Image (tube, grey):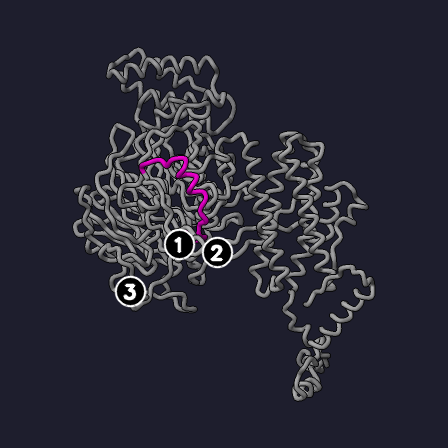
Amino acid sequence: MLALPHHTHPGGLALSNFLRSARSRLLSSLALGLVALPAAAALAQEVPILQPGAPGQPPKRLTAQEAVRVADTRFSADDVRYMQDMIHHHHQAVQMAALVEGRTSRQDLRDAAARITASQADEMRFMQNWLRERGQQVPEPAAANAAAPDPHAAHAMHAAAGSHSRMEGMATPEQMAALAAATGPEFERMFLERMIAHHDGALKMTEHLLDRPGSAYEPVLEAFTTDVKNDQKAEIARMMAILGQLSPDPRTGLKAGFRDAGQAARNMKLVASLPKPTGFFDPRNPAGLPPVKPAKGADAAVTPTATPAATPPTAAARDAKSDPDFGTRSPLLSFANTDMAFSKDLLAVGNYHGFNLYRLGRDAAPVLISSVVCPGGQGDVSIVGNLLIMSVEQTRGRVDCGMESISEDVSKERFRGLRIFDIADPRRPVQVGQVQTCRGSHTHSVVSDPAARDAVIVYVSGTSSVRDAKELAGCVGNIPGDDRTALFRIDVVEIPLADPSRARIIDSPAVFADPTSGRLAGLWQGGKHGDDTQETSRTDQCHDITVFPSRKLAAGACSGNGIIFDIADPRKPKRIDAVSDPSFAYWHSATFNNDGTKVLFTDEWGGGGRPRCRVQDRRTWGADAIYDIVGTKLEFRGYHKLPAAQGEQENCVAHNGSVVPVPGRDLFVQAWYQGGISVLDFTDSSRPVEIAYFDRGPLHEKHELLGGFWSSYYYGGRIYGTEIARGLDVLELTPSDQLSANEIAAAALADQGELFNPQQQFAVTWPAHPVVALAYVDQLARADALPVATLADLQAALGQAKTRVDAKRRDRALATRLEALGTGLAVTGGDPAATRRVAALRDTLTAVAARLR
């Protein structure tokens, strides 16, 4: 539409009327095709213009102007709805900003409220004029306030009147009332959290509009949506900075940097940090920064010059890194660290580029003994005896581990599946076997017991596209009605230990099929679960399957569902139960507790590369979900998400972890990408709580880069974490009121076996040692479950017993005393956890007494 300005002029009303009249005549002429058109074209317009009705109904005759309006693309119904909704959305922001006066003395918060009021009011006027000029209904939310001047009362009226309360980021009437009732620091925190969520909602509304075909076609509206996005993002960044100053959690607002990022820790300490080995990072760009845009007049983008990984950059270098204008596309994950596996004193660290082997010793820092370059991603690893198994999924993977790319759609050189290496000499690993699969191997699970003598069974989870049958025979993609498809399956691989080169797929069971109809797509079909829920991926794959051989169970995190399997026959896994969750976008990983009575599932909302732990992000999205196994059913108990707000530059979501073997408790150490490492107590499944953490600031102060911890696992008394961009970290737990020195020592004494693979669990046991008994005593003392006098007697007797046991001395009298103390134990109250701990303490006292006799 040609929009001429309505400015006043010395000519007065006559000129204004003239302009309007001229515009009307011009538009009418254009619509009727009467402006300098040939006679033939003019005659063509005299033919009747018809619009057919429904079958059986007569056609409707249209004027030329009506015919044009039918296909008018200047603005769409989505544009109109967006502007109408955004007026209400902006109005609530103004209402919230009005609450600042008299509730805080912070000048930065008052300035933010003033900016928001001015910008939102100005944009509301623009949107109202835009609608008015196009003859659309114009919301007047301020009119509602005349009847209800109180801001949250007005919002309640508005919410009751229509669907606006369901708009992204809108505060509920209850939230507005709580905000109005708060003052001081409580108000400041609530205001920032609500306003950040509100601004983020406006961004999502704008993104939804731009995703609609034909929307924001008009240049003025396209420019407006761009301004909205820029203004909202800038204001969110300013408010996040203020919130970081208010947050009592030191993880919020940590300084950015590659080697010099800020650090925060609680009940955990960093004891060693190793950079990536030579050959596993680009020395010109170790942090993996995007290319720098060329300066004006330059011909091509340049790779950012960065200090080598082992050398901290100078202040001048850091300042220089902040100044360039980076491109929007990040490098491939060519050198990203991934998962880990342990065998005795050997540590394998996977990488998209291959893997590295380290020797563990008494010193905290592992010693690098070999590096193997074999690209293909994602490089998850497991160890069985002298074999190392690695997952390969990317199309660039080659049979010969070469680094040359494969450009052909079909190539006999391409490898996607399981690689098998002989690491009998870990200084010189040799590839001895391969199993090609239709969807590659994103992850894998070693099912067999480590004592297996003949063959190892491995479950392969592929999440990529199905290969062309010309490249790998038998691969069938998503062809409707073809049950041979490689989708909706896992692969069961057998690796003969005597000859790994004969490894092969022995079955590809359709584990998601409907048991009644046999339909392959028998579980979650993809999409939303209803209003205000996540959009969950379709279940046609598993990301992780964690096996617990001694329990004959496996837990699968399978895109749209959480599943438990019966693996009594490892070659024939059978689905027992499956659950879905409206808060989960992508079921990513699963971990049993030590008893095999619970499963902790994680949701990788955003795929791991997005900031999903911000103030505005929901506490149940991108989180852990804890289920108890009751009989053969999974029963939901609770959620847990990293409690510290992370910034826009920090990719953060729930990721890989393991049990921390403290007797009497269910503890889980977990990686959150750039959210750091966290230790969670989920002994009470419905009330999980964080008890320890370690975190660094983002890789870059302005640019969002993929980084942080991929995995964190407890092994041999320490916590190991693979940092995607930085390297390998080793940490130790430290005593606190939530975790005692005895509990930490008991975990270090735990028998985890001599093998740890990411998706394989074995029941942990503890020796008959006084420290283990003292760990139970500390837990009972923390819960006030035993009389003070009883606790004192136990601590004194077990202290003496520790001295005797460590010195390998016998003491029959002390043994008798410990047995008597165990016999006399009685729980105060009816806490089931305390009852279980007392029973375990009694058994441990009896076992320690036996050692002393």
Instruction: Give amino acid for label 2.
Output: Trp
Sooner in the amino-acid sequence: mark 1 or mark 3: 1
Q: Quadrant of residue 847?
A: top left
Which class describes the residues within 10 Å of circle 2: few (<14), some (14-19), or many (20+)? many
Of circles 1 and 3, the one toward us is 1
Whether tag 1 and tag 3 are in contact, CB under 8 A, the answer is: no
Where residue 668 sits: x, y (%)? 41, 35
Residue that badge 3 annotates? 472
Residue under label 2, please give it.
524
| Bounds of the magenta segment | 310-330
The residue depicted at 61 percent of the width and 50 percent of the height is 202
Rendering coords of residue 554 (x, y %): 37, 46
Spatial CA distance of label 1 from label 3 is 38 Å
The residue beneath circle 1 is 301
Identify the amino acid type marked 1: Ala
Front one among 72 and 451: 72
